[in-house]
Amino acid sequence: MDLNMMPSYMSRDEYEMQLYGVTQKTVVTSVKETFKETLENVLESVSNKLVTKYSKECIDDFKTALLNAYNNSIEKHTSNLEKIVEECFSIDPSFLLPEDEIQLDSCDQNYEANLDKELSNAKNQLIALTIMEEKLKLLVEEISADEGIVDELLALKTITASLDVDYAELAGPLDRSTSTLVSLLLSKLSLNDGNPQDVISGATDLALLDGQCYFVP
């Protein structure tokens, strides 16, 4: 018997949608969009606290620089994200949904053995779902620890050092407080909260001229 029992008229994406209600591609896209949405909301909150201290142009420059750094990091880690999702959502070639079983040859003597294999695969799938949470958490922390992001956060720390602004309060969701960006994202993905990685390291230069701030490569 051909172990690839998936209906020939359905693509793998269509079969994933029929089985899970989502495809690997939509899961990857959703994780990336959730990350970006969470970051944008955090930056909006930071901007509202800085608006009385700096010009809108300066704040917009900071937001753009940090968003670009995060987006670049997310794209660099996309292949890792895809691998994590594939581990969890891949469908064994021998798996067949009940509604498609009618297509099987009624004389197939191997079908019961294949059912045992499907049950074993389903158990492995549950294990993969559990592992996926921890792997996604580590991936989010890797993205947040990207060198470009570290540099931009250090620039923010430099700005607040010259102002009457508490950096820990201001950048908590972006740095090390209990309400970190990592925790916010994982909670949106319904994953377990974890201790964020310390991302404040590295260096960048900041020029302050006439109330304006300029990031220097």
Image (cartoon, rainbow, N blue to C red):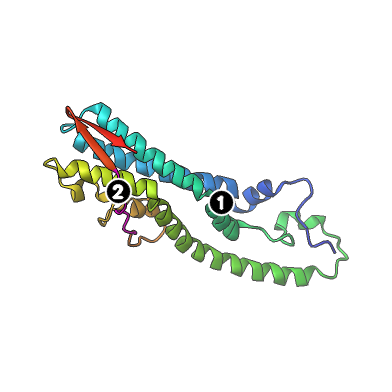
The residue closer to the viewer here, 148 or 206, is: 206
- Residue sticking out furthest to the right: 107
Q: Is the residue marked by circle 2 packed among few (<14), some (14-19), or many (20+) residues within 10 Å?
A: some
Give the side of residue 121 with respect to residue 168, left or right. Answer: right
- Residue at horizontal 58 percent and vertical 46 percent from the top: 25
| Disc 2 element | loop
The residue closer to the viewer here, 49 or 104, is: 49
Which residue has dot 1 on it?
Answer: 79
| Disc 1 element | helix
Give the side of residue 86 with respect to residue 96, left or right. Answer: left
Question: From the viewer's perspective, is residue 114 above or below residue 205?
Answer: below
Q: Residue 40, located in which quarter of the rendered image? A: top left
The answer to whether mark 2 and mark 1 are in CB contact below 8 A is: no
- Residue at horizontal 25 percent and vertical 50 percent from the top: 172
Q: Is residue 201 within the magenta segment?
A: yes
Q: CA distance from mark 2 to mark 1?
A: 28 Å
Answer yes or no: is residue 190 visible. Answer: no
Q: Is the residue marked by circle 1 packed among few (<14), some (14-19), or many (20+) residues within 10 Å?
A: few
Question: From the viewer's perspective, is residue 156 above or below residue 137?
Answer: above
Q: Residue 183, located in which quarter of the rendered image? A: bottom left
Q: Quadrant of the C terminus?
A: top left
- Residue at horizontal 53 percent and vertical 62 percent from the top: 129
Q: Quadrant of the N terminus?
A: bottom right
Q: Is residue 190 within the magenta segment?
A: no
Answer yes or no: is residue 28 visible. Answer: yes
Residue 51 image offset from top left, x and y in percent: 20, 32
Q: Which residues are magenta?
A: 197-204
Looking at numbered disc 1 in the image, what kind of residue is underneath it?
Ser
Which residue has dot 2 on it?
Answer: 203
